[in-house]
Amino acid sequence: MSVPSVRVAIGEERFLARLQQHLAPQSCARLLDLLPYRGELIHARWSGDSCWSPLGAVWPAASILEPENATSEPAPGEILLFGGGTSEPELLITYGLCRFACKVGPLTGNPVLKIGDEDLARLAECGRNILWKGAAPLHVERLT
């Protein structure tokens, strides 16, 4: 059985990502329910080398996603789904050193997608552009 693929578009850049169903099956199912997703990607100044997209507009009301292999220190290329509670629901896209947090303190997110190592330099460039130039459009869609 093949792992479903997802396309993550940040501005004009396109990345192929693999669902991390073996790590967070319920979180991946929730993410798939939200697709296709269009939003803005903003630099996550509290978290280091990462960007985030608020999901409040598409998140089911009063719904909180429980932790599944949740982490506060994702590796570059990992995309976490944070399901609300301490902060608003969001996708966190990591492009370098990251400690996931919000203005009230540390957060943990569930690993839902992984961008391939061969694309990490382009991903880092996207992150630095967002840091210096501002938000970029984000489009996430299922391919298979």
Image (cartoon, helix red, strand yellow):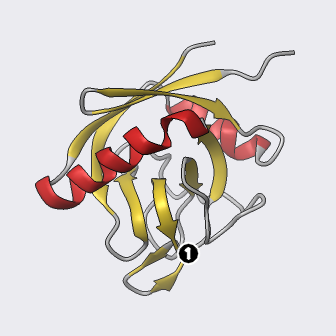
Q: Nearer the viewer, residue 69 or 59?
A: 69
At label 1, counting other C-alpha atoms closer than 10 Å, the crowd grade (few under 14, some 14-19, many 20 or more) is: many
User: Quarter of the image containing the C terminus?
Assistant: top right
Q: Nearer the viewer, residue 24 or 96?
A: 96
In the displayed structure image, the side of residue 68 where residue 134 appears, left or right: left
User: Is residue 115 at all visible to an observer of this figure?
Assistant: no
Q: Which residue is mark 1?
A: 107
Q: Nearer the viewer, residue 137 or 115?
A: 115
Q: Which kind of residue does numbered mark 1 sit on?
A: Leu
Badge 1 element? loop
Q: Position of residue 3 (x, y in %)?
A: 76, 23
Image height of 35 relative to 95, above or below: above
User: Is residue 141 at all visible to an observer of this figure?
Assistant: yes
Q: Position of residue 143 (x, y in %)?
A: 56, 14
In the displayed structure image, the side of residue 126 where residue 117 appears, left or right: right
In the displayed structure image, the side of residue 140 where residue 131 appears, left or right: left
In the displayed structure image, the side of residue 128 where residue 47 appears, left or right: right
Residue depicted at 66% across the width and 56% down the height: 110
User: Residue reaching furthest left?
Assistant: 133
Residue depicted at 53% across the width and 75% down the height: 99
Image height of 131 relative to 144, above or below: below
Residue depicted at 23% across the width and 53% down the height: 130
State the image quarter where residue 2 is shown.
top right
Residue depicted at 43% across the width and 72% down the height: 47
User: Quarter of the image containing the N terminus?
Assistant: top right
Image height of 60 relative to 87, above or below: above
